[in-house]
Amino acid sequence: MCVTKKEKLLEVPVERKVHEDFSRIDKPFGLEQYIFNWIWLGSAHVFAAYYFYLDIAGIVPTSTLLFELLYGYIGGLGITVGCHRYWTHKTFKANKPLQILMMIMQTIANQYPIRKWSLDHRIHHKYTDTNSDPHNSKRGFWFSHMGWLFLPKHPDLQKKLKTFDMPDLENDPIVRFQSRWYWTLTAVIHFIIPIFIFRYFWGLTWIYCIAANYRRYVVSLHITWSVNSVAHLWGDKPYDKNITPVENPWVSFFAVGEGWHNYHHTFPWDYKSAELGWKINFSTMFIDFFAWLGWAYDLKTVSQKMLKERLHRTGNESHNLQQSEAICDNDTNDFDYSVPADVTQLMKDSINEPIWGWDDESIPEDLRNVTKTLRSKGIK
Ligand SMILES: [Zn+2]
Ligand SMILES: [Zn+2]
């Protein structure tokens, strides 16, 4: 019997059996996640505050900040480019060396394994600001910023976490490897290496080295968290006035390009996570550099015509179309990017059922056909 798409959506989702590579991270060291976070992230904040004090009091050299920023931002790119734009949203393809590099960089940031981070984030896009959203911004700034990590999960979210399917990541060998060896990798990459660098170059005592590393960690956490809090609360909504995410240049500045959040939630499959690629967006520069090397390819982006269609339908009329046309004048005439009427209707439907990324089955085929692919290698 033929099952229509609508009938398929109405089916009760089956509880997914979690592979043991992943299950160990759901209860770290046998503890409920939020209890573990109180211990782990709580002690990280105490150490970070201690190092701020040591620095302000002149007990340690302020120059450690240079390495903290360098290592912090390498980890940050592991989150923005690797975990977010590559694994969660599938906005581009990458060869194996780049995947391994991004996995190592993501481990520096220690924001849980790729698979867990991506699961939370896909659910965030699919059920934005509902009780199923891990960091529902309707529950206030502090909840969406960090409170969600320190409180038991809402029952609606618990259900989604058990049933939301991610076969692509569950079968990704690098994602599985990282989840299996997560705490060992974290001990070496996130903890031991930077601590030895503080010891070797600055001659700090071991306890000061640990505190310096925690400051680097805690600052980077708050930058990432500001995407879920600040960029859902304060800013403009030029692309879709009906959703909560906003455009916030300050968040983009600190979070290397992730603050153009109204655009990102409107077009989550765009590798730039923004309309204007290099404007306060170091993550896009990073992807473009690796695309130039040939390591990243099939970069998905939104054509000007598709953008205009959407602006006319859901924008708040604050968008400066002329400016974007001047910068993005690369819509050449070699392909017709006009959006057929039925696609416009399908995109309208996608507001009611948002799309998490390029591999989301609910993206209509016609919409795929009018999406631009840059630096394509034609590899599936
Ligand atoms: Zn996203
Ligand atoms: Zn968001």
Image (cartoon, rainbow, N blue to C red):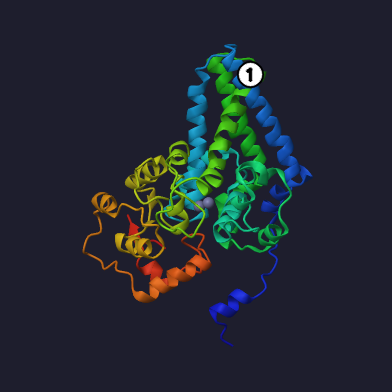
Front residue of 95/307: it is: 307
Is residue 292 visible in this depiction of the protein?
yes
Quadrant of the image occupied by residue 29: top right
Is residue 268 visible in this depiction of the protein?
no
Q: Amino acid at mark 1?
A: Tyr
Q: Is residue 103 left or right of residue 296?
A: right
Q: Is residue 98 above or below residue 20?
A: above
Residue ranking furthest to the left: 333
Disc 1 Cβ-to-ligand 2 distance below 8 Å? no
Residue 219 at x, y = what percent?
56, 32
Q: Is residue 21 above or below residue 54?
A: below
Name the residue carrying label 1.
208
Residue 86 at x, y = what percent?
47, 51
**Where does the N terminus fall, quadrant-wise?**
bottom right
Residue ranking furthest to the bottom: 1
Q: Is residue 255 left or right of residue 275?
A: right
Residue at left offset 57%, top offset 42%: 225
Count the labels in the image: 1
Residue at left offset 29%, top offset 68%: 338
Element at badge 1? Answer: helix
Residue at left offset 57%, top offset 53%: 121
Mark 1 Cα within 10 Å, few/some/many (few <14, many 20+)?
many
**Where does the C terminus fall, quadrant-wise?**
bottom left
Residue ranking furthest to the front: 317
Residue ranking furthest to the top: 58
Residue 48 at x, y = what percent?
63, 26
Residue 82 at x, y = what percent?
49, 46
